[in-house]
Amino acid sequence: SPDSWLLLHQGRRDGDFAMLLASVNGAAPQVVSRGRDLGAGSFARDGKAILVPRSVEQHIAMILLADLKTVIPLTKDPGIEHQPEQSPDGHWLAFTSTQSGHSEVVLTEFQDDGTKVTIGEQRLPVSCAGGGADRHWRKDGKEILYTSPSGQLMSVSVTIAGKSATLGRPTPLPITSTDSGGWGTNSTHTTFVVVEASRAVHQTFRVITGR
């Protein structure tokens, strides 16, 4: 979560899949949902809600932490929509969509007037024609990282001006496809943790600093 006190993750309860909300203070995790209907997503930037993919509808929804039983639909595009993440300023939403026929990272406006939450009609392609997934915003909102279909980690510059966004051309980072079998990064995109042979019995984690 934005205040670093909560962790949203998938787990099991009573032998079934569940989405859990855990606290770093050691309290028992809270069950957000049971079964496979909702996947683990990300926290809204204000820390008051979570953005999640709906497995059955294959779209993105929002759940207020104050009312975990109410699921608010956000998207309804053709294809599968998942991996949502709000921009640092809260005004944009990046997510993965298969509307074009393959997985792409796209960007759209996120609107919250305090009473109703909606997203814009336009879908700006972050990953362009090459496709991609696993997006990650830099904390200043000026860059999005994603993974290409070949496993290459890619960088796209983002320029926000009012209600418009301009995206740069995807640029590969010096992290090879074998490195990015699994990866994580810090908020400034200057340190990376990568997993070699992510599905192997014995795994190696490496820390890469700099770009």
Image (cartoon, helix red, strand yellow):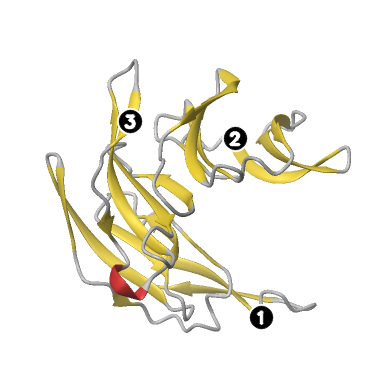
The image quadrant that residue 115 belongs to is: top left
Q: Position of residue 105 (x, y in %)?
A: 37, 60
Q: For marks 1 and 2, give the CA distance.
A: 29 Å
Circle 1 residues within 10 Å: few <14, some 14–19, many ≥20: some
Residue at image mark 1: 197
Q: Residue at x 23, y 47 (%)?
A: 122
Q: Label for residue 118?
A: 3
Q: Label for residue 6?
A: 2
Which is nearer the eye, 133 or 160?
133
Q: Is residue 32 left or right of residue 106?
A: right
Please name the amino acid that badge 2 sits on.
Leu
Which is nearer the eye, 141 or 167?
167
Q: Is residue 118 left or right of residue 135?
A: left
Please name the amino acid that badge 1 sits on.
Ala
How many discs appear? Answer: 3
Circle 3 residues within 10 Å: few <14, some 14–19, many ≥20: some
Of callouts 2 and 3, which one flags the residue occurring earlier in the amino acid sequence?
Answer: 2
Callout 1: SS = loop
